[in-house]
Image (cartoon, rainbow, N blue to C red):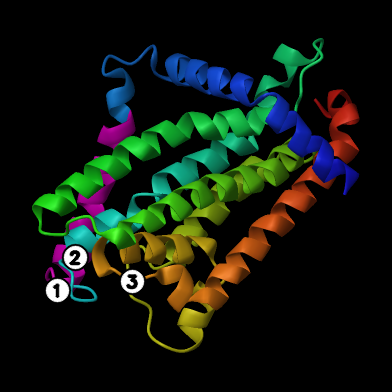
Amino acid sequence: MKAVWTVFKEHIKNIYLIKRLAEFQIRITNHSNYLGMAWELINPAMQIAVYWFVFGLGMRSNTPQDGVPFIYWLLVGISMWFFVNQGVLEGTKAIASKYNQVAKMNFPLSIIPTYIVFSRFYGHLGLLAIVMVICYFAGYHPTIYTLQLLIYVPFALILTVAISLVTSTLGVLIRDTQMAMQALMRIVFFVSSILIVPPKGIVTDVMQLNPIYFLAEAYRAAILHHDWYFISHWELAVYNVILVIVLLVVGSILHMKYRDHFADFM
């Protein structure tokens, strides 16, 4: 557990540095684009429009899902996916791409994937705010159940950081990790409840192993269904908390074991 404690201390000690680096990362990511930060919203909007056209109009004739019009059901369920997906993929290559910039400094390497993930978190908050405004005008007003987002939004952040802590180390050791994660994230997206309501039985049981299933349903419960999801589905909530803890422990151990040898793999 020494590795976990070391990584935890580095994050607490450098939390202000993480924030500054995340803000700088946002600027350098968008500085060459004419529309700048607007692409953080334009890109998700275009993808949502395609999914709604294909899965909503094309396959379901816009049939409501769980009593909610498909477009709002989709908007809320998919709102966190863009953050998790981009955070994991960019976090995976974070150390490999940034190592040479900090190799000769006394820099806490464990915070590199974290600040990369955090730079994507701002876009998620903006998109979520817009989705909630759209739902408000559709008649889905904030209630006490909406306060659950104070649990689910940080959980999405911690989950993404935990995954990136594991994959960023593997990304240095095994260069194929980035390509493998791209393929895996596509599978994770479709093996979730973002686009479909899975039939009861083994399909649902398998999908529930996917943390994205939990997040999609939890967001919908908070905004659309007015249900205390982490209570009514407490077994699923406990499973996902344990999953994140395991990822953080494994990621910390891997990182501390190999980070003194990163230069040999670069």
Q: Specify the principal SS of the magenta part.
A: helix
Identify the residue at image location x=33%, y=31%: 40
Identify residue type, mark 1.
Answer: Thr
User: In what element is the residue under mark 1?
Assistant: loop
User: Where does label 1 land, which residue?
Assistant: 63
Identify the residue at image location x=23%, y=48%: 132
Identify the residue at image location x=58%, y=47%: 158
Q: Is residue 205 above or below residue 142?
A: below
Q: Which mark is residue 70?
A: 2
Q: Is residue 110 above or below residue 155?
A: above
Which stretch appears magenta? Answer: 40-63
Q: Looking at the image, which residue sits at the far front?
A: 144
Residue 55 figure quarter: bottom left
> Residue 60: x percent and y percent?
18, 72
Q: CA distance from mark 2 to mark 1?
A: 6 Å
Check whether the beta carbons of the residues at disc 2 and disc 1 lie within 8 A of each other.
yes
Point out the image quarter for the C terminus.
top right
Identify residue type, mark 2.
Answer: Phe
> Residue 8: x percent and y percent?
75, 38
Q: Which mark is residue 227?
A: 3
Mark 2 is surrounded, within 10 Å at the Cα level, by few (under 14), some (14 to 19) or many (20 or more) other residues, namely: many
Q: Which mark is residue 122?
A: none
